Image: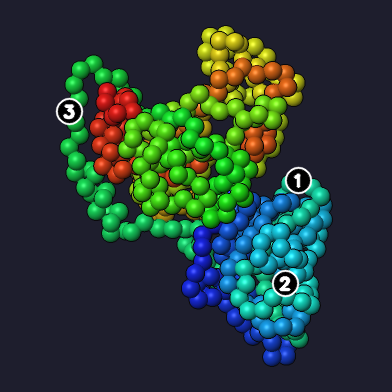
Amino acid sequence: MRRAALGVALTGALVAAGLAAAAGSASAATTVTVQAESYAGQSGAQVEPTVDTGGGQNVAYLANGDWLRYDNVDLGAAGAITLGARLASDSGTTGSIQFRTGSATGTVLASIPVTSTGGWQTWTTTSAVANTHPTGAQTVFLTLTSPQAGNFVNLNWFSVTAAGGTTPTTPATPTPTGTSGPGWPTVNAAQQAADTAAFFALTPRPITGNVVRVPEFNAGCTVSHHLNDDPIIFPGMAGASHAHTFLGNTSTNANSTNQSLLGHTVTTCTPAEDLSAYWIPSLLQNGTVIDPAGVTVYYGSRLKDPSRTQPFPPGFRMIAGDAKLQVPSSGNQFWCAGPGGQTGRSADGNWPICAPTANLTYQLVFPDCWDGVHLDSPNHKDHVGPTGPDGTCASGKFPVTIPSLSFVIDYPVHGTTAGFTLASGMASSMHGDFMNAWLPAAQAARVRNCIDQSVKCNAAGNN
């Protein structure tokens, strides 16, 4: 998903949560300034650099219905407080940011109006007063509302100032920059280096017979279950997502972690050593869920030289596609696989109508390269990326070659002029999520024997 980001639980002192206290500019009040990207959970956010000096990073592309969650925000003692926000907007439509406690539907403490500031990086500080509020450390939600469907505001930081204080005009502490801070979990560098060295020290299985020279192995998966959960986007928040169709590990839910997946050995994928979690938005026809007949998860390489491909590390996760992309499409995002192919389009042009001998199909492709440091990133995409200038991972921003993951999804339906819908919306919103929970030795053997040697293997890892 283009803008979606992992909700990472923030614990410990306020500084660790991205909070900083600064002296207010009026009376003896204190101001707590919270950097926007230090959220503990979110929906619809994307972190980007702020162009003005000292701006650090901001949370961008916020739209109607999006929200941000911040833990351990000190609202102080009883009495009025001023809630401030440094924001920018180039939208032609107004909107507002609501401050709530407890949940994204909790009581509104105050609402800050949003109007155009003249640019997405033209910043202004706006405030509102909350006369009553819970005291002490609270979970604060910022919810976004606007009459338009598109993005309408960027947020740099927000602040809480006691009565008599004023909202600061600059952040109290520098905003973390680069690839660090909340949402950027890292591998154990020493362990990763040791694992990488041990992997490339493995002697590949000798190539015998007339093999097919395609660097690839796969996992064949069927549907496990359906939930309105997403352990990457909404960790620990059961029911917070649109409906997903889950494949693989049968325990996957909002609370899933790498450890919980590895501790549950039942999967709907073959081989049994793949305990990973895979999920996609549910497909609906006239309101009824259409399950895939099967999903083949390919692990391969699109590089000219795949020999430096190494396994995904434990705990690795990523997303492909964009759940918020809602645009008409008459192209081949979905297509018809089988004899006869496509015979027409739905009335809105967004969906193919397949011949009776062909099935609705989709292939979702993930990136080839990894930064080698982070198991995830705030939008679940920035830790992975394309090849560098010479077509290898080593020459680019993402120097580690990982298996090129793709889902080939086969729906046993042919379609009508009424078309379909996804739980996330239009056909353009198709997306997929991956939480790696392969048994390490099983994945390593397949990568080394199949991908690194450019040999086409089956789910068992045999050519």
**Residue at point 55%, 70% (across, down):** 18
**Residue at point 64%, 37% (across, down):** 423
Q: Which residue does the numbered mark 2 point to in the structure image?
A: 84
Asked whether residue 210 is in view, the answer is yes
**Residue at point 61%, 49% (across, down):** 239
Looking at marks 3 and 1 on the same chain, the residue that comes earlier in the sequence is marked by 1
In the rendered image, residue 81, in percent from the top left (x then y), is placed at 74, 79
In the rendered image, residue 452, in percent from the top left (x then y), is placed at 28, 34
Circle 1 sits in a helix, a strand or a loop, which is it? loop
Q: Residue extending furthest bottom?
A: 28
Circle 2 sits in a helix, a strand or a loop, which is it? strand
In the image: residue 330, left or right of residue 402: right
In the image: residue 129, left or right of residue 458: right
Q: Which mark is residue 149?
A: 1
In the image: residue 123, left or right of residue 320: right
Q: Quadrant of residue 58?
A: bottom right
Q: How far apart are the alpha carbons under marks 3 and 2?
A: 65 Å
**Residue at point 32%, 38% (across, down):** 273
Q: Which mark is residue 323?
A: none
Q: Amino acid at mark 2?
A: Gly
Circle 3 sits in a helix, a strand or a loop, which is it? loop
Q: Which residue does the numbered mark 3 point to in the structure image?
A: 206
Looking at marks 3 and 2 on the same chain, the residue that comes earlier in the sequence is marked by 2
Q: Amino acid at mark 1?
A: Ala
In the image: residue 76, left or right of residue 458: right
Q: Amino acid at mark 3?
A: Pro
Residues at badges 2 and 1 in contact (C-beta under 8 Å)? no
Q: How far apart are the alpha carbons under marks 3 and 1?
A: 56 Å
Looking at marks 2 and 1 on the same chain, the residue that comes earlier in the sequence is marked by 2
In the rendered image, residue 90, in percent from the top left (x then y), is placed at 76, 54
**Vertically, is 429 above or below 48?**
above
